[in-house]
Image (cartoon, rainbow, N blue to C red):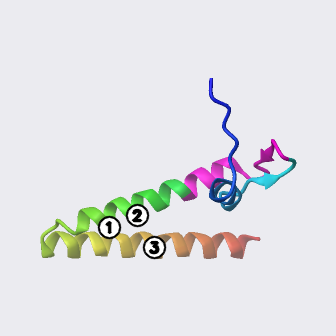
Amino acid sequence: MLGLEPSGIVIELIEVLGYTYLDEEIHAFPGDYFNVLMEGSALIDQAVMNLKMKTMTPEERAKQELIQKNREEYKAKMKADAEYKK
């Protein structure tokens, strides 16, 4: 078995991902895993769609852009409604 001792850029990556340094051997994630996973999933979905759009016809691309615009407007409305309810 290999004993890996991450350092440098690996430690930076771990900390950028939201982990907190506790000691030489331990980093802990104090955040909400569900929210982080949902945000990561949304970022991945967006990146995949951007790649797919490069191969779409202009009509397909226009349709997809409209769908994305409607989703963003819906999310903004839901967020505004949630803030209003608070």
Give residue 50's mark.
1
Residue, far right: 23
Above-or-below relation of 13 to 3: below
Q: Position of residue 25 (x, y in %)?
A: 81, 42
In front of the other: 19 or 77: 19
Other residues around mark 1 within 10 Å, as few (<14) / some (14–19) / many (≥20):
few
Q: What is the span of residues highlighted in magenta in the rendered image? A: 24-39
Instruction: Pick whichever of labels 3 and 1 is earlier in the sequence.
Output: 1
Residue at disc 2, secondary structure: helix
Residue 4 placement: quadrant? top right
Q: Is residue 54 magenta?
A: no
- Amino acid type at circle 1 is Asn
Residue in the picture at 52% in, 69% down: 75
Residue at disc 3, secondary structure: helix
Residue 83 placement: quadrant? bottom right
The residue tagged 3 is: 72
Query: From mark 2 to mark 1, how far is it between C-alphas?
Result: 6 Å
The residue tagged 2 is: 46
Q: Position of residue 31 (x, y in %)?
A: 75, 53
Q: Is residue 22 left or right of residue 53?
A: right
Query: From mark 3 to mark 1, how far is it between C-alphas?
Result: 15 Å
